[in-house]
Image (spheres, rainbow, N blue to C red):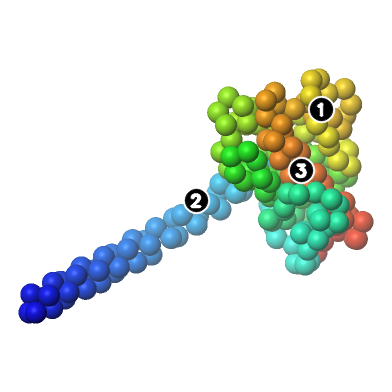
Amino acid sequence: MKSIIKDSLILCVITLVAGLLLGFVYDITKEPIAKEQARAKKEACKEVFANASDFVAPTTSIDTAKIIKDAGYTASVSEVLVAVDDNKNVLGYVMTAVSSGYGGDIEFTVGIQKDGTVNGISILTISETPGLGMKAKDSKFYGQYANKKVPAFTYVKGDATATHEISAISGATITTNAMTQGVNSALAVYAYLEANGGVSIE
């Protein structure tokens, strides 16, 4: 009996010490991790909106889920940031789109100018099939969305012949659809915001 109590006390002490050490490590690493995440996000924003001085959260409430559902798309927009110049003039938006691909969620930023031109996209996370869906990370594919002003994109098998068309990744239709749904969802949110007077940032 004494042996069981002793072993239990030892186990409790070990668990307590381990918990304290984990908490200590978390406190030490929390701030550096947050800073790195913020740096990575700003870098991704810069990739799709190079001429912006800063990216700020709007004070306007935006129900992106409803906007996207009403537009008929299946992706989501998890964050909307406003791209501004040195004088805080609104240049456009950077939206973080999340869409369901073949291997899981694909998350990427979409830069959209005030006039509706898509600057480009920058992939944040992707886990598609190597040699197929992972080709979404090739500029030959994602560059098709850049510098185009269209209400929405569609994808085609073979060569794209119209401005709004995207040439699908061969053998990776699900990935192509996920990327296109994400961009179109961002465009739907953009169109709604502009049709309703834009956003407030102060």
Mark 3 falls on what kind of element? helix
Whole-Å distance between the Cαs marked 2 and 3? 28 Å
- Label 1 with label 3: CB-CB less than 8 Å: no
In front: mark 2 or mark 3?
3
The percent coordinates of residue 177 (x first, y second) are 74, 37
- Residue at 29% in and 69% down: 20
Mark 1 falls on what kind of element? strand
| Quadrant location of the N terminus in the rendered image | bottom left
- Compared with 85, 156 (above or below) is above
**Residue 156: mark in rendering:** 1
- Compared with 101, 7 (above or below) is below
- Compared with 74, 201 (above or below) is below
From the image, tell me which residue sits under label 2. 36
- Compared with 21, 75 (above or below) is above
| Residue 118 appears anywhere in the view | yes
**Number of marks in picture:** 3
The percent coordinates of residue 34 (x first, y second) are 50, 57
Q: Amino acid at mark 1?
A: Val
- Residue at 77% in and 59% down: 64
- Residue at 72% in and 53% down: 77
| Residue 47 appears anywhere in the view | no
Q: Amino acid at mark 2?
A: Glu
Mark 2 falls on what kind of element? helix
From the image, tell me which residue sits under label 3. 181
Q: Amino acid at mark 3?
A: Gln
163 horizontally vs 44: left or right: right
